[in-house]
Amino acid sequence: MISAAAPTLSAAPLWYLSRSTGITSFVLLTVAMAFGIAATQRSLASPSWPRFATQNLHRNVSLLALAFLTLHIVSTLLDSFVPMSGWSAVVPFASDYRRPWVALGTTAFDLVLVVIITSLLRLRMNATHWRRLHYTVYAAWPLAWLHFVKTGTDAAHNGFGLWIGIACAGVVGAAVAVRVVSGDNGPQRLRSLTR
């Protein structure tokens, strides 16, 4: 139920745009994370669902998440409800609004940018360096989750955002558990098979 104090869409379109793109980008980031973990699982691939299909989904969902994340940041900066500077989008602790929680979101954004930029340059990079940089997403996702749950108005007071956060944590937790339980070491296994 919407609070009587909540502004209407016509009165605060940027606030609604910021909220909706924040939710969408976080859900897409979660899906991208799950597909990324699944893409490393050679044991989960089959003739009907080859590994490259999961990799392509992971890549495309990641870019879509970045597009919505960019809209979230731009709409938040343009909205006058929360005074934020452009620096707060890339420099942690530059925002006065809910400083620690916004800083976590900023840090997550910076890490996601590193992962996406280096992934676009993957063929020009050393594979080991790229993989190590790509693993920073395991730090970015929990930071984004904390930002989503603690900064977003939709997660406050047991709102539906909290349930979205719990569901997303369940998805990522299940994906990580499958990876650990399957014992599929990805690159190490591939190297041992090619020796």
Image (spheres, rainbow, N blue to C red):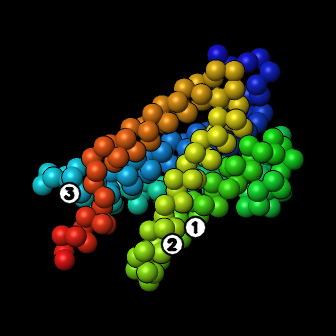
| Most foreground residue, 5 or 194 | 194
Q: Residue type at mark 1? A: Val
- For label 1, the residue is 114
**Mark 2: which secondary structure?**
helix
- For label 2, the residue is 118
Quadrant in which residue 91 is drawn: bottom right
| Most foreground residue, 138 or 22 | 138
Quadrant in which residue 88 is drawn: bottom right
**Mark 2, other Cα within 10 Å: few <14 / some 14–19 / many ≥20:** some
Q: Is residue 154 left or right of residue 132?
A: right
Q: Are the residues tagged 2 and 3 within 8 Å (C-beta)?
A: no
Marked residue nearer the N-terminal end (2 or 3): 3
Coordinates of residue 22 in the picture (x, y in percent): 62, 43
**Mark 1: which secondary structure?**
helix
Q: Residue type at mark 3? A: Pro
Residue 21 visible within the image: no
- For label 3, the residue is 50
Q: Is residue 81 left or right of residue 160?
A: right
Residue 22 tag number = none
- Which quadrant would the C terminus be assigned to in this image? bottom left
Distance, label 2 to label 3, CA atoms, is 24 Å
Residue drawn where x is 59% and y is 28% of the image: 162
Q: Are the residues tagged 2 and 1 within 8 Å (C-beta)?
A: yes
Kindly give the residue lying farthest to the left in the view shown: 47
Residue 184 visible within the image: yes
Residue drawn where x is 44% and y is 68% of the image: 131
Coordinates of residue 167 in the picture (x, y in percent): 48, 31
**Mark 3: which secondary structure?**
loop
Distance, label 1 to label 3, CA atoms, is 27 Å
Marked residue nearer the N-terminal end (1 or 3): 3
